Amino acid sequence: MALLLCGKVTVFLQPKPGTSSFTQNSQLNLHPGISSLDSFQLSSSKLKFQIKSRVPSKKLHQPYVLAVRKDRPQNADFPRQYSKKEKKPFPIPIVELRRAARERAKNRSGQPRRPIPPPKRGLLVKNLIPVAYDVLNARVTLINNLKKLLKVVPVHACLFCNEIHVGPVGHPFKSCKGSDSAFRRGLHDWTNATLEDVLSPVEAYHLFDRLGKRIRHDERFSIPRIPAVTELCIQAGVDIPEFPAKRRRKPIIRIGRKEFIDADESDLPDPDPPVPLKPILNEIPDSKVLAPSQEEEKVLLAEETLQLWERMRGGAKRLMTMYPVRVCGYCPEVHVGPSGHKAQNCGAFKHQQRNGQHGWQAAVLDDLIPPRYVWHVPDVNGPPLQRELKSFYGQAPAVVEICVQAGAVVPDRYKPTMRLDIGIPSSIQEAEMVV
């Protein structure tokens, strides 16, 4: 027997082992029958508890287990905002890394050595070269589409802090921590946002040889800085004439832990001139950006932009599994390569104790491509967000919120943080009645 409850949750009644089952025509009234919750088991996909009925019935004389199955969680916590005085946590705790290293050493005894991955030997992973081209072209197309959507979807940015808001008017929440925020009592001073506010510009040093010597402090101004995603794609096999990279055809020869020499490639035929596997797209100048004129065109543009966002992040995550990316644990500095640079330009909390050096650790995808979470507006044409109902609103990445307000369908992976299944009270009095 199956019932449908609110919140898109399907309820199944299952008999306990050893008890009789329902007949096909049996009926059950849940409201007068629920007297106590004898067992309450909660998981991400199933919720079970017992129901004892007070209604006398010959067909229903044994307790039944009520199993609630849901495809996704109703809501989820927002990503944590770390303080500037707090170090970022490691993606994998040090204790877990040491435990895994001991386990590998234990299992490796008497076994042949595993092959070293190609990036550590100075070679490219051939099956990831098309992925690198797709990520780079997806990033360029995403930028071009966002330039068009920003002309039809209003996006606001605070003049004193880095917070942004997608909607007709800025939100009223007192969360500004910029200069003179005490005089404004935490209120934001909104203005029109730009593309850099939506897509945070994360830059990194371009390396001609990713296995070469680390960048010294006195070389920090002589080496160009490019977007970190572009640098990751170049190291993964994308050839850009403006930013050349060394390509080896033979693995390096290790003569020490940190010393190596290049193999002799004189016996190999002359390499062919590099030909891109796919044409690399170019960004549209701001003067030539045309906004979508019709509603259908805007919806299609929003759907395409959302797909490009997922394609860029998914491809970059695949590249990061083979080509390491480092991030400073104290500031947003990102370095694409096996080890971070030596430039002493970290100005985060207590940088004097580190002499301005970065605390490098393994980066995650959000360090390379920050999502920039913003408040989700349930109804663009309805009333604006209210300060007293802040706990009922959800959040979503800025790119996703722009596409949703332009008409795109909300992806399932972002629905828990957007809290679409939570009913928003119509007034403050109604909100006070919520338990």
Image (cartoon, helix red, strand yellow):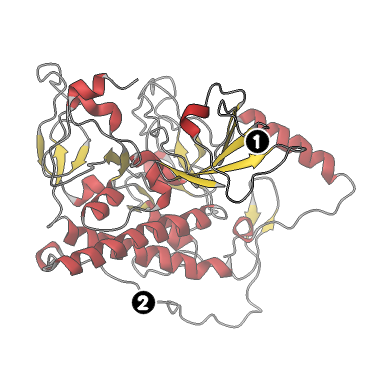
Q: Which amino acid type is shown beneath numbered disc 1?
A: Lys
Query: Would you say 370 lies left or right of 209 here?
Result: left
Which mark sits nearer the N-terminus, 2 or 1? 1
Residue 185 higher or lower than 369, as above or below: above
Which residue is painted at 35% across and 67% down in the image? Answer: 137
**Badge count:** 2
Q: Nearer the viewer, residue 90 or 270?
A: 90
- Given residues 361 and 405, the one toward you in this image is 405
**Nearest the camera: 131 or 408?**
408
Toward which corner of the image does residue 208 lie, by quadrant? bottom left
Whole-percent x, y for residue 411 in the image: 38, 53
Describe the element under mark 2 as helix, strand or loop.
Answer: loop
Vertical side of 340 occupied by 280: above or below: below
Q: Which residue is mark 2?
A: 279
**For this view, does 55 lie left or right of residue 157?**
right
Residue 97 as seen in the image, left or right of residue 231: right
Which residue is drawn at the image coordinates 16% and 55% (left, top)? 150
Q: Position of residue 364 (x, y in %)?
A: 48, 43
Residue 177 visible in the current orientation: no
Residue tagged by mark 1? 58
